[in-house]
C-alpha cells in the first residue's frame, strides 16, 4: 500500500479508484461525499467530517476481485494509510468504525435488522455482533463516541441520489486538520 503524503495524493486516489462500488449501489467516492455531507449537516467537528469523508479509504487499496468475499480490515489499513497526514481525532474513528457497527448490533437489536444486505454480509465476515465483554471494551475506547457517530453517517450515506458535492469541497476542512 502506498501511503498518501499530501491532500493531492488523496484526491488523486479517489479520482482514480473512487468510482468502484462495493455492493451498496453507490460508488466509493459518492459514499464518502454523502457521509461527509451528513456529518457536516449534523454539526460535527471538522475532524469527524474528515473522518466521515475518508473512513473507507482502505477499500480503495483492496483488490476489486476480493470485495465482499473476505474481510480485508479496510478500517485498519485505511487508518494506517492516513496516519502520516492526520492525528488521532481523524484516524481513531476510522479505525473503530467497523467495531462501532459490531457494538451497535449488540447494543441495539433494531440496528442489526436495519442494516443493508451488503452491510450484513460484511458484518458476518467481520466477526458478527459483539458479545457483552467486547461491547464493554469498545465502550471504554477513546474516540468510541465519534466512531459511533461515524458509523451512523456510514449507514445513511448510501443514497442513490447524488450528494451534489465534490471531494475538493472538503479540501479546506482537511487542510485544517492536517498534522
Image (cartoon, rainbow, N blue to C red):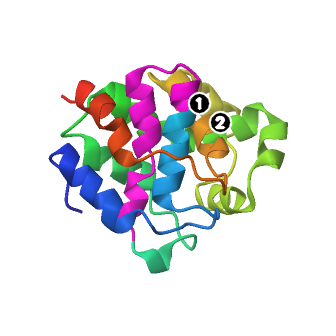
Residue in the image at 55% along x and 44% along y:
34
Q: Earlier in the sequence, mark 1 or mark 2?
A: 2
The x and y percentages for residue 22 are 56, 66
Q: In this rendering, is residue 64 above or below 90?
A: below
Which labelled disc corresponds to residue 103?
Answer: 2
Residue in front for this viewpoint, 155 or 79:
155
The residue labelled by disc 1 is: 148
Quick check: 169 left or right of 126? left
Q: CA distance from mark 1 to mark 2?
A: 9 Å
The quadrant holding residue 129 is top right
Q: Is residue 124 left or right of residue 38?
A: right
Number of callouts in the render? Answer: 2
Residue 131 drawn at (x, y percent): 70, 39
Q: Main secondary structure of the magenta part?
A: helix
Q: Quadrant of the N terminus?
A: bottom left
Percent position (x, y) of residue 54? Answer: 40, 44
What crowding class fits label 1: few (fewer than 14 Cα within 10 Å), some (14-19), or many (20 or more)? many
Residue contact between numbered discs 1 and 2, judged by CB atoms under 8 Å: yes
Secondary element at tag 1 = helix
Task: For marks 1 and 2, give the one nearer the viewer.
Answer: 1
Q: Is residue 160 above or below residue 62?
A: above
Could you say which quadrant of the image residue 61 lies in? bottom left
For the C terminus, give its image quadrant.
top left
The residue lying at 28 percent from left, 52 percent from top is: 11
The residue lying furthest to the front in this view is: 164
Residue depicted at 48% across the width and 46% down the height:
33
**Magenta-drawn segment:** 39-62
Q: Quadrant of residue 116?
A: bottom right
Q: How many neighbours does mark 2 have within 10 angstroms: few (below 14), some (14-19), or many (20 or more)?
A: many
Residue drawn at point x = 28 percent, y = 31 percent: 172
Against 98, is 122 above or below?
Answer: below
Note whether 121 is above or below 135 in the view shown: below
Amino acid at each position: 500500500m502506498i501511503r498518501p503524503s499530501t491532500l493531492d495524493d488523496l484526491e488523486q486516489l479517489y479520482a482514480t479508484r473512487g468510482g468502484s462500488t462495493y455492493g451498496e449501489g453507490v460508488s466509493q467516492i459518492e459514499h464518502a461525499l454523502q457521509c461527509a455531507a451528513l456529518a457536516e449537516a449534523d454539526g460535527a467537528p471538522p475532524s469527524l467530517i474528515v473522518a466521515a469523508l475518508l473512513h473507507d479509504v482502505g477499500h480503495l487499496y483492496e483488490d476489486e476481485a476480493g470485495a465482499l468475499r473476505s474481510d480485508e480490515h479496510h478500517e485498519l489499513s485505511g487508518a494506517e494509510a492516513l496516519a502520516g497526514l492526520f492525528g488521532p481525532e481523524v484516524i481513531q474513528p476510522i479505525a473503530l468504525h467497523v467495531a462501532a457497527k459490531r457494538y451497535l448490533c449488540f447494543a441495539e437489536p433494531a440496528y442489526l435488522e436495519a442494516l443493508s444486505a451488503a452491510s450484513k454480509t460484511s458484518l458476518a465476515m467481520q466477526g458478527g455482533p459483539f458479545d457483552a465483554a467486547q461491547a464493554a471494551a469498545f465502550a471504554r475506547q477513546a474516540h468510541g463516541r465519534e466512531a459511533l457517530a461515524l458509523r451512523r453517517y456510514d449507514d445513511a450515506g448510501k443514497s442513490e441520489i447524488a450528494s451534489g458535492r465534490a471531494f475538493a469541497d472538503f479540501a479546506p476542512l482537511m487542510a485544517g486538520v492536517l498534522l
